[in-house]
Amino acid sequence: MDKTLTRAQITQAVQEAYEECKNISGGHNADYIPFLANIDPNLFGLSVTLLDGTVINVGDTEYKFGIESVSKVLTAILVLKQHGADAVLKQIGADATGLPFNSIFAILLENDHPSTPLVNAGAITACSMVEPKGDSWGKWEAIINNFTDLCGSEAQVIDELYKSESDTNFNNRAIAWLLKNYNRIYDDVPMSLDLYTRQCSVGITASQLSICAGTIANGGLNPVTKAQVFAPELAPKITTLISSVGFYQNTGDWLYSSGIPAKSGVGGGVLGVMPGVMGIAAFAPPLDVAGNSVKAQAAVKAVMKKLDLGVFNGDRVTVTD
Ligand code: GLN
């Protein structure tokens, strides 16, 4: 069915969703990364980017929080750009694990590949695939420049967070070496792990993340900068990965109840992609047991419900003035 939404309707839905969700309690800040435990749990931002470049921001949308696992989406795009969709499928995979993001068991179950670039194992493998091979600085530049292109503005590592993660990432070290055992790290192991840790420690705003989501929703064309960041044919590939595993073991429940493919991070961020319509991002630190922000999930769901949108609704959506 054809469906028309006005910018004013969308703006109102975002504002109402923010108001409805701002007093939701429940969840806890991630505490296995000490820096994250101390972030103000009351921070809350909601942002929508439309494909004409309009960015609708409500609340703490300029606060720089740890991007954490949402970074996996951005670097998966880089690796898709550098190696192509077939190589990503072959060298990493595109399967849901049905298990927590940092699962070692998942690697043992699928020893032929690390499943998907959107869990820790596959994300460390993705960092090992970033070109130029063997050049830690060159690889980091490729990763962070890709962040800038997707988000439309620069982002920097939060040094204290990077140190906090590097000092405590014992589980990820085990994952990296286990992957090496299966020949699934394609560069130096400590370097690949360090790049992963560094990308997770980047400070990002909800506004920047919604522009990134809008770029994916817009077939790789950044709606704000108007730069073609990646080829249009890669957009359905990244959205498929997000759909299948974006909320880890809760992904099916999430997609079923929200209607939008989305990716979470333990910093409290959620990035959602409604292809051809909009990108959305929300941020609030307290998480549920699977590591997904309680308030951000509620806010994204509320926007989708108010606009009666859903990726499987079969509607042809037009946004007008
Ligand atoms: N840096 C975190 C980790 O590797 C990211 C996890 C997440 O956001 N789910 O554990």
Image (spheres, grey):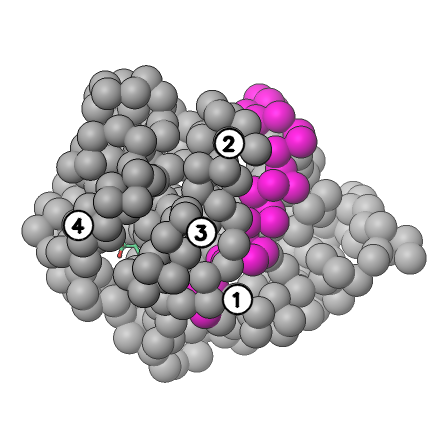
Where is residue 303 drawn, in percent x and y?
Answer: 63, 64
As drawn, the label of residue 196 is none
Looking at the image, is 140 positioned above or below residue 292?
Answer: above
Instruction: Please state the total of marks drawn on the protein image.
Output: 4
Tell me which amino acid carries mark 3.
Answer: Ser
Disc number placed over residue 115 in the picture, else none:
3
Q: Residue 87: which numbered mark, if any?
A: 2
Residue 105, position as x, y percentages in the image: 32, 65
Identified by mark 2, the residue type is Ala
* Quadrant housing residue 35: bottom left
Whether residue 128 appears in magenta in the rendering, the answer is: no
The residue wearing badge 1 is 251
The reply to whether the magenta stretch includes residue 241 is yes
Q: Give the distance between the C-alpha atoms of the residues marked 3 and 1, in whole angstroms.
A: 15 Å
The numbered dot on residue 173 is: 4
Q: Is residue 198 visible?
A: no
Judged by depth in the image, the label closer to the viewer, 1 or 2, is 2
SS at mark 1 in the image? helix
